[in-house]
Amino acid sequence: MGRHADELVSWLRNHAAGLSYLGANSVLKQQLHEAASAIEGLEVKVEQDARGKWVIGRMSPQGWLWRFLTWRERLALWLLHGETEIRP
């Protein structure tokens, strides 16, 4: 995830942690957590191991979602020398 997105997610989670679940704050706290999760779900990271390059996406209840890169994504990484963020 990019630096700005990390900072925004951290800011949202820190402000949500300061709120309680009592009264009107409960709705705000829930929305802050949902916004942070939505931002984290937008970006993915590329990892490489012996099997090849693969994409790790957002966290689901079953664990991290991942898949292998498509040939178009591999080509984009090669053309841009790996200096890019890939968004699904």
Image (tube, rainbow, N blue to C red):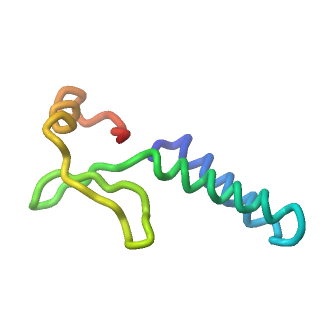
Front residue (pair 78, 24):
24
Drawn side of residue 25 relative to residue 83, left or right? right
Residue at 82% across / 70% down in the picture? 20
Q: Position of residue 34 (x, y in %)?
A: 62, 56
Q: Position of residue 6 (x, y in %)?
A: 54, 49
Q: Position of residue 84 (x, y in %)?
A: 33, 34
Residue furthest to the right in view is: 23
Residue at 35% across / 41% down in the picture? 88
Drawn side of residue 28 relative to residue 58, left or right? right
Q: Is residue 4 above or below residue 57?
A: above
Q: Position of residue 16 (x, y in %)?
A: 73, 61
Drawn side of residue 54 relative to residue 31, left or right? left
Residue at 37% across / 39% down in the picture? 87
Front residue (pair 42, 10):
42
Q: Is residue 48 above or below residue 79?
A: below
Task: Indicate the quadrant where residue 15 lies.
Answer: bottom right
Residue at 36% across / 65% down in the picture? 64
Counting every numbered tag in the picture gives 0
